[in-house]
Amino acid sequence: MTRLDRQIAFLMEAERLRKIERSTPIGDGSRPENSAEHSWHLALFALVLGEHGAEGIDLNRVIRMLILHDIVEVDAGDNPIHGNVDTAAQEAAEKKAADRLYGLLPEDQGAELRALWDEFEAEETPEAQFAKALDRFQPPLLNLATDGVNWKLYEVTPEKIERRIGRAVERGAPGLWSWLWPRITGFFAGTSAR
């Protein structure tokens, strides 16, 4: 296969991300979002909310991570953050998917994009921490817009949200968490102005 053949093969596999349904509904509540929509939405979040990341953050790198972060779901599927998931099994499935999918690309390009995916997963750099914060920040916004449909489905409590979402958002974008948390607690207290 030529370099272009390999690039096209990767792009056609990545296109399948549109068929991966997430549990989070789109903002009007009419249907679940798919993983491709989620990745696009997060890239837009980074573009618009970049000023809320660490000073000097490389937004181009953040956006690239967000476009790539869920491609593994083509093989591994999506698991709801509030669902009961075997984390070790999911991580193994995602690594295997990353090996296959990024392995479709020419070696140099596959290594570069895989490194961005690994960086996102490790959450050690300011860019990865901000990208992860945005990945955790977006679903509660959609839940607030849809009267907590997924929170009700998964019997989510504010404490569970703080534990599974809050820590990542606060670490990578503390100002976003300071804005979001009162809205979440207000929702659960029945006083939220959505």
Image (cartoon, rainbow, N blue to C red):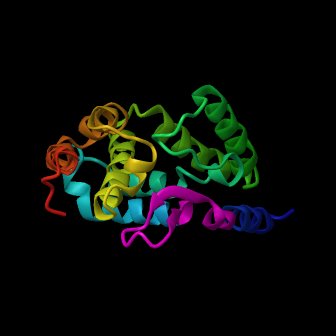
Relative horizontal placement of residue 82, taking residue 145 as reference (left or right): right
Between 151 and 183, the one lying in front of the other is: 151
Relative to the observer, which residue lies in front, 54 or 165? 165
* Image coordinates for residue 9, horizontal then vertical, percent: 77, 64
Front residue of 20/46: it is 20
Frontmost residue, 41 versus 188: 188
Q: On screen, 11 above or below 168? A: below
Q: Which residues are magenta?
A: 15-36
On the rendered structure, is 88 left or right of 32?
Answer: right
Question: Is residue 26 rendered to the left or right of residue 179?
Answer: right
**Horizontal and vertical percent position of residue 61:** 41, 52
Q: Is residue 75 left or right of residue 157?
A: right
x then y, percent, for residue 118: 54, 38
- Residue 24 belongs to magenta span: yes
Residue located 37% across and 73% down the image: 28
* Magenta-colored stretch includes residue 165: no
Is residue 87 positioned above or below 20 on the image? above
Quadrant showing the N terminus: bottom right
The quadrant of the rendering that contains the C terminus is: bottom left
Q: How many marks?
A: 0
Question: Which residue is located at x 63 percent, y 35 percent?
Answer: 90
